[in-house]
Image (cartoon, rainbow, N blue to C red):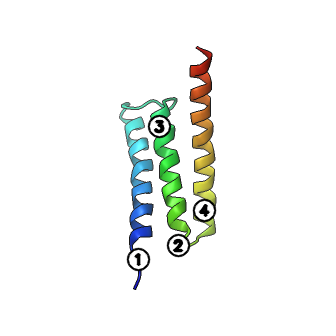
Amino acid sequence: MKSYLPDVVGTLGVALILLAYVLLQIERLRSDAAAYSLLNAVGAILILVSLAYEFNFAAFLMEFSWLLVSLYGLGKFFLARRGN
């Protein structure tokens, strides 16, 4: 019997990334805000978890890159706050 949990987890990840992008476009979130990078990072992690059940190299590469960029954004945010 197939488990739908990986699909649910991956879909939640996609929803978080899309939510971050929509909030950015409607100017409810700034691209330099921690929340923007956090939504993207968590979304990418959830998609990566779902890929552990049904691997796709291209999707893995995309989401891993998305995670790295999001972590860079979070690091940049916290370093800037620390400097103030």
Mark sitting earlier along the chain (2/1): 1
Amino acid carrying mark 4 in the image: Phe
Looking at the picture, how far across and down is residue 69, in whole percent?
A: 61, 43
Mark sitting earlier along the chain (4/2): 2
Between residue 82 and residue 10, name the one nearer to us: 82
Residue 9 is drawn in which quadrant? bottom left
Between residue 18 and residue 12, name the one nearer to us: 12
Query: Residue farthest to the bottom?
Result: 1
Looking at the rendered structure, the secondary structure element under dot 3 is: helix
> Which residue position holds label 1?
3
Mark sitting earlier along the chain (4/3): 3
- Real-space Cα separation, disc 4 to disc 1, in angstroms: 20 Å
> Which residue position holds label 2?
53
- Real-space Cα separation, disc 4 to disc 3, in angstroms: 21 Å
Which mark identifies residue 60? 4
Quarter of the image where the C terminus is located: top right
Report whether 72 appears left or right of 18: right
Mark sitting earlier along the chain (4/1): 1
- Real-space Cα separation, disc 4 to disc 2, in angstroms: 12 Å
